Image (cartoon, rainbow, N blue to C red):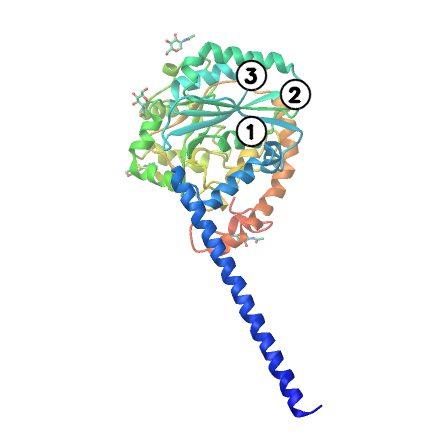
C-alpha cells in the first residue's frame, strides 16, 4: 500500500467520526428541546386549568389509582394473618375539621357501641375506629347492629366518627387493628386509647393551649404520656361525674388506696411514668422507660412514630413491643402534668388472655434482639445521646 492511499483512509475515517459526533450531538439537542417543549406544554396546560399539579405528582396518583386497593392493603398490612377484609370508611364522617385537631384512635367489637358512645360524650375530638367483626359470626346480623347504632345516634356521631370495618376469622389482631385506625385517621395528632378509659373533657384544650406540648407534638419529636389509673376493686358506675375530675382528687383517692396505678404497682407496664413525679409537678417532665414491658397511653404525631408490629396477634406483648420500638426509634417520652386516665371496670376473659399471652411470650423475646439489631445503626450513631445501648445488648437484661 502506498503512502497516499494510507492518508486517504486516515482522513476519511476521521471525517466519518466527526460526522457521527455531530449527528449524536444534534439528536441529543433535539431530544432536550422536545422534552423542554413538552414540559412547557404541560405547565401551560396546568396553568390554563388553574391546577397546580406537577407532572410527577400526576403520574404518581394515576399509578396508585390503577392498582387494586386489595393489593395496596395486602402490601400495607404485610405481616398479618389472612384472609382479611378491610373496608376503610365504612361509615364516613361529614363534618369539617382542622388539620391540627386531635383524633382518638381505637378498636371495638359490635358489643362495645355503648361504651364508644359514652367515650364520644367525653372526648370532643375526632374518632377513627377499627370495628372488628368475626367472619364466622352472623355478619348480616352484626352489620344490622351497626346500622341501628348509627341511625339511633346519627346526629351526634356523624360529624366526628369514621368507622373502618375489618372482617376476618382472627379475633384479636390487635396491632393490625391499631394500625388501621391510625392509618385512616384524618389528623396528624392521634391519641390511641381503649374506649373504656375516662379522660378529662378538657384534655384537647389542655394540649392545644400548652405551646411547649403542642409544638413538640406538631413537629413529631415527642410522645406525651397520660398517667393511667384504675380502681381497687369494682367501680361499676360509668358516668363521667362519678369519676374524679381534678388532679387533687385523684391524688387523694390514690393516697386513700382507692385508686392505683393501672395494672398494679409491681407491674412494669406503667411505672416508668413516675407517678410520684406526676403528683408533685405542674410542668411536663421527661422520662426514660425502665422496662421493656412499658406500655403507656400517649398522644403523638402519627407521622413520626413507628407502626405497631403486626406479627403480635392476641393478648400479651403487642403494646409493649410497639412501645419498645418507639423508644429505640428515638422519640422523646414526656408526661403531661395535669391530665390522667381512669380505667372503667370490665370483666376480662382470663382463660383466653393466659393462653394467648403464653403464646406471645416467645415471640416477644425474639422480637427484642431483632428490633435492637434493626435500630443498631441509629443507636451507635447516637450513643452519647439519651438513648443508650444497654437495653440492646444481647442476653443482657440488666437495664430492664
Ligand atoms: C353514678 O354516679 C352519678 C354521679 O356521681 C350519680 O348521679 C348516679 O346516681 C350514679 N349511678 C348509679 C347507678 O349509681
Ligand atoms: C376536667 O374537666 C372539667 C370539666 O369537665 C374541668 O372542670 C376540670 O377542671 C378538668 N380537670 C382538669 C384536671 O383540668
Ligand atoms: C421519680 O421522680 C422523683 C421525683 O419526684 C425522683 O426522686 C425519682 O428518682 C424518680 N424515679 C425515677 C425512677 O426516675
Ligand atoms: C415535690 O416537689 C418539691 C418542690 O419541688 C420537693 O421539695 C419535694 O421533694 C418533691 N417531693 C417528691 C416526693 O418528689
Ligand atoms: C450488662 O450490662 C451491665 C451494665 O448495665 C454490665 O455491667 C454487665 O457487664 C453487662 N453484662 C453482660 C453479660 O453483658
Direction bottom: furthest residue: 2
Q: Can you give x and y, in whole percent of width and height, for residue 351 in the image?
A: 64, 22
Identify the element where label 3 is drawn: helix
Left/right placement of residue 201 relative to residue 191 reads left
Q: Residue 388 carries which label?
A: none
Q: Which mark is residue 177?
A: 1
Identify the element where label 1 is drawn: helix
What residue is rendered at 46% in x and 19% in y? 344
Q: Can you give x and y, in whole percent of width and height, for residue 183 in the image?
A: 50, 33
Sequence-first tag of 2 and 1: 2
Provide the residue designation for mark 3: 110
Q: Does the residue labelled 2 lie within 8 Å of ligand 1?
A: no
What residue is rendered at 39% in x and 29% in y? 102
Identify the element where label 2 is drawn: loop
Provide the residue designation for mark 2: 135
Left/right placement of residue 173 relative to residue 297 reads right
Q: Which of 54 and 377 is in front in this view?
A: 54
Sequence-first tag of 1 and 3: 3
Sequence-first tag of 2 and 3: 3
Q: How crowded is mark 3: few (under 14 residues within 10 Å), some or many (20 or more)?
A: some
Q: Can you give x and y, in whole percent of width and height, for residue 199 in the image?
A: 39, 24
Q: In this view, does 309 lie above or below 152?
A: below
Quadrant of the displayed image that contains ligand 2: top left
| Alpha carbons under labels 2 and 1: distance apart | 15 Å
Asked whether the viewer can see residue 28, the reply is: yes
What residue is rendered at 44% in x and 47% in y? 41
Which mark is nearer the camera, 2 or 3? 2
Q: Is residue 8 above or below residue 234?
A: below
Q: Can you give x and y, in whole percent of width and height, for residue 328 in the image?
A: 50, 46
Direction right: furthest residue: 1
| Alpha carbons under labels 2 and 3: distance apart | 13 Å
Q: In this view, does 248 lie above or below 1?
A: above
Amino acid at each position: 500500500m502506498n503512502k497516499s492511499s494510507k492518508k486517504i483512509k486516515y482522513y476519511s475515517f476521521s471525517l466519518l467520526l466527526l460526522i457521527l459526533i455531530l449527528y449524536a450531538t444534534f439528536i441529543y439537542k433535539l431530544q432536550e428541546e422536545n422534552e423542554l417543549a413538552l414540559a412547557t406544554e404541560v405547565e401551560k396546560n396546568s396553568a390554563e386549568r388553574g391546577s397546580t399539579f406537577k407532572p410527577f405528582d400526576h403520574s404518581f396518583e394515576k399509578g396508585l389509582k390503577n392498582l387494586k386497593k386489595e393489593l395496596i392493603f395486602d402490601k400495607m398490612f404485610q405481616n398479618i394473618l389472612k384472609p382479611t377484609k378491610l373496608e376503610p370508611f365504612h361509615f364516613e364522617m361529614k363534618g369539617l375539621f382542622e388539620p391540627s385537631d386531635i383524633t382518638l384512635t381505637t378498636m371495638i367489637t359490635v358489643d362495645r357501641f355503648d361504651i364508644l358512645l359514652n367515650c364520644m360524650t367525653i372526648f370532643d375530638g375526632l374518632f377513627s375506629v377499627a370495628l372488628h367483626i368475626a367472619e364466622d359470626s352472623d355478619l348480616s346480623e352484626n352489620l344490622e347492629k351497626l346500622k341501628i347504632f348509627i341511625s339511633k345516634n346519627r346526629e351526634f356521631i356523624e360529624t366526628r366518627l369514621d368507622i373502618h370495618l375489618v372482617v376476618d376469622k382472627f379475633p384479636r389482631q390487635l396491632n393490625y387493628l391499631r394500625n388501621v385506625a391510625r392509618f385512616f385517621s384524618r389528623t396528624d395528632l392521634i391519641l390511641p386509647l381503649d374506649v373504656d378509659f375516662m379522660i378529662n373533657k378538657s384534655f384537647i384544650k389542655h394540649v392545644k393551649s400548652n405551646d411547649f406540648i403542642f409544638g413538640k407534638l406538631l413537629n413529631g419529636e415527642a410522645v406525651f404520656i397520660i398517667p393511667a389509673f384504675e380502681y381497687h376493686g369494682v367501680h361499676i358506675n360509668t358516668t363521667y361525674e362519678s369519676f374524679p375530675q381534678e388532679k387533687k382528687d385523684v391524688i387523694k383517692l390514690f393516697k386513700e388506696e382507692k385508686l392505683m396505678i393501672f395494672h398494679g404497682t409491681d407491674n412494669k407496664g406503667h411505672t416508668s411514668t413516675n407517678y410520684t413525679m406526676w403528683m408533685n409537678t405542674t410542668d411536663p417532665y421527661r422520662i426514660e422507660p425502665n422496662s421493656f414491658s412499658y406500655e403507656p397511653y400517649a398522644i403523638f404525631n402519627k407521622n413520626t412514630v413507628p407502626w405497631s408490629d403486626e406479627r403480635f396477634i392476641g393478648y400479651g406483648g403487642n403494646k409493649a413491643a410497639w412501645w419498645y420500638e418507639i423508644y429505640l426509634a428515638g422519640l422523646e417520652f414526656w408526661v403531661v402534668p395535669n391530665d390522667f386516665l381512669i380505667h372503667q371496670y370490665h370483666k376480662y376473659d382470663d382463660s383466653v388472655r393466659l393462653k394467648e399471652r403464653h403464646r406471645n411470650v416467645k415471640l416477644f423475646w425474639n422480637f427484642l434482639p431483632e428490633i435492637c439489631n434493626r435500630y443498631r445503626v441509629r443507636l451507635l450513631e447516637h450513643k452519647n445521646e439519651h438513648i443508650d445501648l444497654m437495653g440492646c445488648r444481647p442476653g443482657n437484661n440488666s437495664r430492664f
